[in-house]
Image: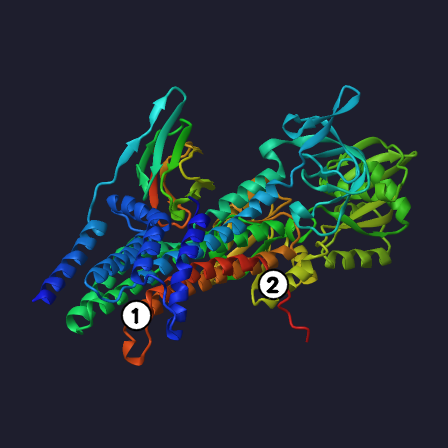
Amino acid sequence: MIKIFVLLGGLLAIGFIFWWFFGQHTTQTVAAAVSGERQRVDVEVNGGYSPERIVLKQGVPAELHFTRKDASSCLDRVVFSDFGINQELPQNQERVIQIDTSRPGDYQWACGMDMFHGQLIIK
Amino acid sequence: MSITKRFWVSLILSLPMLANMLLMPFGWMLPGGAWTQLVLTTLIMLISARPFWQSAWASFTKHHANMDTLVAIGTATAYVYSLYAMLTGQAVFFESAAFVTTFVLLGQVFEERMRRNSANAVEKLANLQAKEAEVQRGDRFVKVPLADVQLGDVLRVKPGQKVPVDGVIVQGSSTIDESMVTGESLPVTKQVDDAVIGATQNGTGTFLFRATKIGENTMLAQIVELVKKAQNSHAPIQKLTDKVSDIFVPVVLSLAIATFLIWYVFLGASLANALIFAVSVVVIACPCALGLATPTALMVGTGRGAKMGILIKNGEVLEAVNDVKTVVFDKTGTITVGHPQVTDVIGDEARVLTLAASLEEASEHPLAAAILDRAQALALTVPAATNFHAIEGKGVQATVAGQTAVVGNHKLVADFALTEAMQRQVVALQDAAKTVVFVGLGDQIIGLIAIQDVPKSTSREAIADLKARGLKTVMLTGDNQRVATAVAQQVGIDQVIADVLPGDKADHVRQLQQTGKVAFVGDGINDAPALTTADVGIAMGSGTDIAIDAGGIVLVKNDLRDVDRALALSRKTFNRIKLNLFWAFIYNVLGIPVAAGVFYAIGLTLSPELAGLAMAFSSLSVVTSSVLLNRAKIRTKVRTTA
């Protein structure tokens, strides 16, 4: 009897895992706040990036302020492969990344091991 | 707390439990038994393992899972079960949680160090720059920081100093070691009007030069920028791991639960044993090795290329090189020197050249430049000519020392007498694809000057290397068939496509692409479309900025032999990526079934501790293999000695 409950519990757990990780969940999107000649977005790095999608205005110099709260070495670098940026993120210190917004498009960023991803949209 | 500190804490607290495990067969027991283990492991969990949990939880709330998720769940399961077992008086396995934490941290400590090693090629490049420069201010030279050097400043470089920025020598001469930027191992002699590169090492001379490029426009700064971009670029092969890494952790967690269910529910294993199998599965699966396989190899490979004067722009190029079947060369400036030179003078050399030089002095024709260069090299004094007038389509006529002199092409011959012997020589020279210039004085042709754009001294060897690699070599040129064939024979090219209009180069590349991937080597503005069209565009470093932008690989040294080296390095790097991915996959493909107890029947199992060790070593071995790429031999001589 116990085994049947365990089995059901286990199957439910697997079901939950699939729903939780593969289901459609909305990602947080933030458009940059434009102040004068620049635009900036603060990104918190903690078990991933928040926000995960950033929308920037084309042609306005942009700064992304990354702060890593997470101790994991997985997230200790942030890589924008399209811009040749590979920035180390020391824990709990803000690091500024300048983005060239001259060309519109969809760009990806990722952690140093390519496990966590973020999306950058310039339009 | 840093990873290193967390590792040491975890190691020291684990040691008593390790001793307990090893010495148990000899009758030694840890004083305090399970209670001591509980205290030690709880400390490890609180101090060393807590960040794993925090990171795992933060990821979880964002619907993500990573390696920390696996470690956190693995260790937490072992720990919580042991608490339960202690309460109910069963065997505990606290040490599994402790050892797994220690091993995973050990792996991360090493990995962090190795990753730092693989990334420092660019820093080393950037650090090559001089810190200050001696700039002429008024009539004195003053030392200023590098950032204060202005465009057009005159700078002084003393023996043994570094050249601060790019420029052109205006006074003095020296030999300069340019190996740090171009990879050229021999020092290069530089005189007035020669270009010098910032960050190169001056030899024994003192010279003054005018700064032509400063700041981020210098060659070094641009190389650093290129390498940075390349190192962080994506190789197409990575798309596979991108996909895998997205689903990897949740799938592994599900597999672990399934493992537990099968053992506990269907095979009737005890709760403890079923849990151990599940924990092993969670712990051995390491997505990190997969994620690290490509970027680390790319980083080391492109960094090493930069040191050799071969700039590989991105991972895509690297991957494309692997399947290249045909290498297409532009002729002028790539295979040949790029400007015509006098190769033969028939007749009295000094007399013929002097006369030709005085007539051509005002001309801007490339053939005229060749004649003037030669006259200058021989230190001839050239008398002034008067009464210039051009003979349409034939050449130029003028009066020198009271006599009428002419210089021109074969159409002139009709008006002049030509000896039988000279006639034969004209044919011989033309057969060798040389352009023949006739020099006449009075009504006599007194000599012939043969001019040709000669192949670079290294071209022949470079092409032989490529052929030895089994590649087909093709030359594409706008020159006529005869000239092209002659050059091709001199350097050993397989196929010649001559009379190509500049705009058609890309079309010819496209045609060649039908039989396999094509690499195009070129340097001119007109090569840019072909460089872009080809699967791999290789731009010569001496070329125009447009060509360098269009190319996927840039050869800083301008040495054609580097084409072969570039191909060898790219292949080596790409093979290393494949090897890394193979190992990373194998770890998981073999490791997970073993950990799940599939081979239990034949006695092959993996405890959580061993699984933790294996996991630490999988990412470590991948990074090590990438770093070793720095030592790998780049074989350029594929030719057998026979």
Look at mark 2 in the image and give the residue it sits on.
Answer: B633
Please, is residue B209 above or below residue B300 in the view?
A: above
Which quarter of the rendering shows the C terminus of chain B?
bottom right
Residue B211 is left or right of residue B74, and the answer is right
- Identify residue type, mark 2: Lys
Residue B196 quadrant: top right
Up the image or down, B272 lies above or below A103; here it is below
Q: Position of residue A59 (x, y in %)?
A: 40, 28
Q: Which residue is mark 1?
A: B593
Q: Chain of mark 1?
A: B
Circle 1: element type: helix
Of the residues shown, which amino acid type is indicated by label 1? Pro
The crowding category of the residue bearing disc 2, from other C-alpha atoms within 10 Å (few below 14, some 14 to 19, many at least 20), is few
> Going from the N terminus, do you reach mark 1 or mark 2 first?
1
B141 horizontally vs B57: left or right: right
Q: Is residue B276 above or below residue A60?
A: below
Secondary structure at badge 2 equals loop
Badge number at residue A121: none
Examine the rendering and report whether any part of residue A10 can be seen: yes
CA distance separating discs 1 and 2: 37 Å
Display colour scheme: rainbow
**Farthest residue, direction left:** A1
Residue B199: percent from left, percent from top: 67, 39
Q: Residue furthest front?
A: B31
The residue mark sitting in front, 1 or 2, is 1
Chain ID, mark 2: B
